[in-house]
Amino acid sequence: MSLKHLTPDELHPLLNDPSLLLIDIRNDHELVSGILPGALHVPLGHLASAFDQLPQDKKLVFYCRSGVRSVSAGEFALAQGVKDVSHLAGGILAWAGAGLPITAA
C-alpha cells in the first residue's frame, strides 16, 4: 500500500465519514491557529507511543502545518500495517487557503 495524498477539496467532503479518523500531528503550541473539525490531536513525537490506542478499523488521515510531517506519520502508519492511510497535501495552510473551516482547539 502507498500513502494517498488528499487535497483540501478532496478531504473536505470526507469529514462526515464515520470510518475516517483525522489526526492532527502538530505540536501543542501550533494549535493556537485552530484544528480541523473532528480531528484528534496526537503530536508526531507521541505517535509511536500512542499508536496502539488508535482505532485499527478506521481510515487514517494525517495532517500538519504544511504537509511534510504528515507524510512521515503516514509512512509510519503504513509500516504498522494500516491499509488505508492518507495525508492532507499542503497541510492546514492549504486547508485555510482554500477557505475551509477551522475550529478552535
Image (spheres, rainbow, N blue to C red):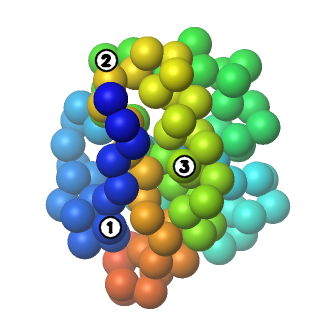
In-image side of 63 versus 19 (left or right): right
Q: Is residue 104 above or below residue 71?
A: below
Q: Is residue 41 above or below residue 49?
A: below
How far across and how far down the image is residue 37, in percent? 41, 58
Q: Which residue is mark 1?
A: 7
Q: For the residues labelled 2 and 1, say whether their Cβ atoms are less than 8 Å apart.
A: no
How far across and how far down the image is residue 52, in percent? 57, 13
Give neighbour class at mark 1: few <14, some 14-19, many 20+ (Cα, 10 Å).
some
For the question of whether residue 104 can be seen, the reply is: no
Residue that appears at 65% across and 73% down: 33
> Which quadrant of the rendered structure holds the C terminus?
bottom right
Residue that appears at 49% across and 47% down: 62
Q: For the residues labelled 2 and 3, say whether their Cβ atoms are less than 8 Å apart.
A: no
Q: Which residue is mark 3?
A: 71
Q: Which residue is mark 2?
A: 57
Q: Residue 67 — which label?
A: none
Q: For the residues labelled 1 and 3, say whether their Cβ atoms are less than 8 Å apart.
A: no
> Which quadrant of the rendered structure holds the N terminus?
top left
Give neighbour class at mark 3: few <14, some 14-19, many 20+ (Cα, 10 Å).
many
